[in-house]
Image: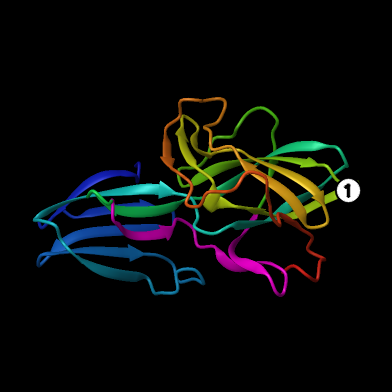
Amino acid sequence: MEPWGHFTVSEYEAVHRVVGDLAVHLRIERGALVVGIDAPVGPLTGFGPTREERWAAPGPATSVEVAPALPDRPVVVGVRNPFRLAPGAETRLQVHLPIWAQVHLEDEERTLLAELPSAVLSPTWWGGKTRGELAYWLPAEVEHAEADIATAAPTRAVCVLRIANRSTRVLEVDRLAIRAPQHSLFRTRRGFVTDEARIVYLGEADAAVDVSGAPPAFEPDAPRVQGPRLLLPRGLRALTFAHLRSLELY
C-alpha cells in the first residue's frame, strides 16, 4: 500500500501508515491531535518503541499529509564495493538513500508535526578533528550505471552522482559524502529519484560539488515532491571523499 498521501483524521477515523521501519498513527482525542510514532530503538531515534506528541486540533476533522523527504543531514556512504578512478576519468554512480517521512498539517504554513527516517541510520562525524559536521552513516554498494536508472524500493530514493577526477593522482573511493539536504526529490515511474550531483575531485580533500536541481533526463516532467532543505552554492568546495585508512577523517 502506498504510504504517502492526504488523509483526514477525526474522532471516528484514525490514520495508520507504515513507511519502512517507521509507523505513524494519528487520532483525535479530547480535542487534541495525537501523533504517535513507532520506531526501533536506535542511536538516531533515541526513544522506545512508541512516542506520542499532542497538538491542539484545528477542528473535529483535521487534514494531514504524509510526505516523502530526503535526510536532513549529509549521508556518508561506506562503499562496500570500493573502486579507483584514474586521473582524467569520469564515472556515473547510483546510490539508494533511505527516505524520511514527514507529517504535515494541511494549513497555510504546512506545519510540520513529525519527521522520522524509514530506516534507522547511525550518526557519524564527517571531517577533521577541528572542523566537520554531523552526518549519517550508510554502508551500501554503489552501482556504476552510465545509462539506465534502477527502480527504487518504495522507501528509497536513487541518488545519481557523476564523479570526475581532475587531479593528477588516483582517486580511491571507499567513503563519500552525499549532501542530501541540498538535493531535490522527484517522483518518477521508477520510484523516487534525486537530482544529479556533479562532483569534480581536485586533489587531496578538495572537490567541487554542483547539484542540478532538475528532474532526471529519462522523465523531464517528473513532479518535484521536495525541494532542497538548504541551497548549495554553485561550485561549492566541500569534503566529499575520504579513505578508511586516513587518520584525519573518522
Q: Which residues are magenta?
A: 110-139
Task: Tell me where residue 78 appears, x and y as whole percent.
Answer: 69, 57
Location of residue 174 by image quarter = bottom right
The answer to whether 37 is drawn above or below residue 96 in the figure is: below
Q: Please determine whether, in this image, residue 183 is positioned above or below residue 30.
A: above
Q: Is residue 247 magenta?
A: no
Give the residue at x 54% y 45%. 183
Residue shown at 45% from the left, 74% from the top: 46
Residue topped by disc 1? 170
Relative height, residue 216 to residue 9 (above, below) = above
**Residue 124 drawn at (x, y percent):** 62, 68
**Magenta segment: does it hold 134?**
yes
Question: What is the chief secondary structure element of the magenta stretch?
Answer: strand
Q: Disc 1 residue type?
A: Val
Task: Identify the residue shown where x is 70% and y is 30%.
Answer: 146
Q: Residue 22: image x %, image y %?
A: 40, 58
